[in-house]
């Protein structure tokens, strides 16, 4: 669980209504924060993925509140994402299946005071996302959880596993925090635990020498270019590239995993 020394208030850059939400903070809110939290988790595809595939990673909020009056709803979420841009490319947002929100977006570089978002859809491996409930209607969060939004990624390269994380804090030009603003106590941060999504790929084809997800001409060229030598193209581990390795490669021709 992320521990905060004091409750945060909604920033005026978000929207004019946020000033109203931040006008009053209960005197005992710091104690309430320690006992009432909303966890954030990223949920990716259950199975293995392949290079070039587009995947959806859901941002979910789950209440683990020990009391009923706080930590069971939110009016806003600031969420900092982190991923490996050589392995994954953030494509944008999908709202299908998510709770109704007044706003769900990546702030553009012109209004992102933190400097995290260098493009409207960030590409450099970190991103700041904002979610805002409809004014006067906090999003209710059950112990089973609700879907806030969906982040769409594309698999860019081969890997065994890759994580998409929620960072508790990040400083680029200005400090920024992942925050969940409570729906009952104005300005109270009820952020709890943060859970990443782990994306896995099927074991690569032994014949996929260039690891592009398929066995093709480039792999054949690499094998023939190292003929009679050890190393690249020695698919059977005999110590030299020969006809046996060529037969293995041709027998696996096509997309990895194809029958």
Image: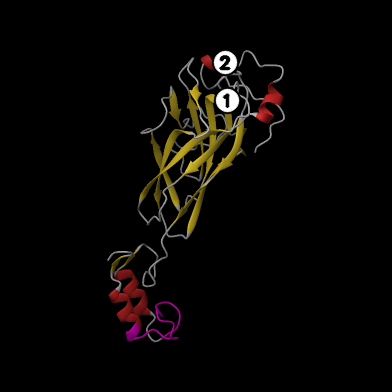
Judging depth in this view, the residue of 51 and 113 nearest the camera is 51
- Tell me the residue that label 2 is attached to: 21
Query: Mark 2 near mark 1, Cβ–Cβ under 8 Å?
Result: yes
Q: Which residues are magenta?
A: 229-244
- Tell me the residue that label 1 is attached to: 181
| Residue 180 locus on image (x, y percent) | 57, 29
Which of the 4 quarters of the picture holds residue 238? Answer: bottom left
- x 28%, y 75%: residue: 251
Q: How is the image coloured?
A: secondary structure
Secondary structure under the numbered disc 2 in the rendered image: helix
| Residue 170 locus on image (x, y percent) | 61, 39
Q: Dividing the image into 4 quarters, which one contains the N terminus?
A: top right
Left or right of 79 in this view: 250:
left
Which of the 4 quarters of the picture holds residue 39? Answer: top right
Left or right of 145 in this view: 93:
left
Which of the 4 quarters of the picture holds residue 242? Answer: bottom left
Judging depth in this view, the residue of 32 and 159 nearest the camera is 32
Q: In terms of sequence position, does the residue under pointer 2 or pointer 1 come before the other? A: 2
């Amino acid at each position: 669980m992320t521990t905060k020394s004091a409750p945060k208030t909604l920033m005026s850059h978000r929207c004019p209504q946020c000033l109203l939400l931040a006008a009053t903070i209960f005197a005992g809110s710091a104690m309430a924060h320690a006992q009432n939290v909303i966890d954030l988790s990223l949920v990716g595809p259950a199975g293995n993925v392949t290079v070039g595939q587009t995947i959806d990673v859901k941002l979910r909020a789950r209440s683990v509140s020990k009391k009923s009056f706080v930590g069971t709803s939110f009016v806003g979420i600031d969420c900092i994402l982190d991923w490996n841009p050589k392995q994954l490319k953030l494509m944008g947002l999908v709202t299908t299946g998510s709770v109704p929100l007044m706003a769900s977006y990546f702030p553009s570089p012109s209004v992102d005071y933190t400097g995290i978002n260098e493009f409207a859809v960030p590409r450099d491996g970190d991103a700041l996302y904002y979610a805002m409930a409809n004014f006067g209607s906090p999003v209710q969060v059950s112990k089973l959880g609700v879907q806030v939004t969906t982040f769409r990624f594309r698999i860019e390269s081969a890997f065994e596993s890759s994580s998409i994380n929620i960072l508790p804090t990040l400083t680029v030009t200005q400090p920024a925090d992942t925050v969940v603003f409570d729906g009952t106590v104005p300005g109270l941060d009820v952020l709890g635990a943060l859970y990443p999504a782990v994306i896995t790929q099927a074991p690569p084809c032994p014949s996929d020498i260039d690891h592009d997800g398929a066995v093709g001409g480039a792999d054949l060229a690499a094998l023939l270019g190292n003929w009679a030598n050890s190393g690249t193209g020695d698919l059977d581990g005999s110590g030299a590239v020969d006809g046996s390795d060529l037969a293995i490669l041709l027998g696996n021709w096509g997309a990895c995993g194809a029958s």
